[in-house]
């Protein structure tokens, strides 16, 4: 992971940028050519969709 230029949690931003205030984002990784955003699936998906996804990944 030597290409990672930074890892930040939304609690460290003051004031937080608009994107980071979204309730379904928990972390952001800045890479030289892209950004990786850690999401909270439970807050994005409907509960039935999340249950199906959990069943698929548990196999």
Image (cartoon, grey):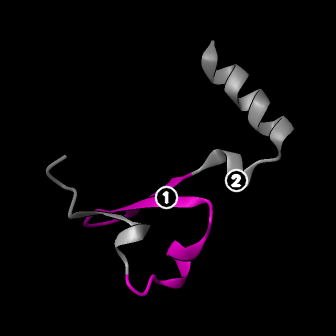
Q: Residue at x 19, y 46 (%)?
A: 1
Of 26 and 58, nearer the camera is 26
Residue 16's tag is none
| Snapshot quadrant of residue 33 | bottom left
Of 56 and 17, nearer the camera is 17
Residue 48 appears left or right of 33: right
Residue 19 pos. (x, y %): 54, 77
**Residue under label 2:** 43
Q: Which residues are magenta?
A: 14-39
In this view, 12 is above or below 7: below
Q: Residue at x 78, y 28 (%)?
A: 52
Q: Residue at x 50, y 73 (%)?
A: 20
Q: Residue at x 43, y 68 (%)?
A: 10
Binning the other alpha carbons within 10 Å of mark 1 as few (below 14), some (14 to 19) or many (20 upward) gives: some
Residue 9 pos. (x, y %): 38, 63
Numbered disc 1: secondary structure: strand
Residue 46 appears left or right of 26: right
- Give the farthest residue toward the bottom: 15
**Residue under label 1:** 26
In this view, 1 is above or below 24: above
Task: Give the mark, 2 or 1, whose residue is nearer the N terminus.
Answer: 1
Residue 36 pos. (x, y %): 41, 58
Residue 40 sits inside the magenta stretch: no
């Amino acid at each position: 992971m030597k290409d990672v230029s930074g890892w930040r949690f939304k609690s460290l931003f003051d004031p937080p940028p608009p994107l980071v205030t979204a309730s379904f984002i928990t972390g952001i990784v800045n890479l030289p050519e892209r950004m990786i955003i850690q999401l909270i699936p439970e807050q994005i998906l409907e509960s039935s969709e999340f249950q199906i996804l959990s069943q698929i990944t548990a196999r």
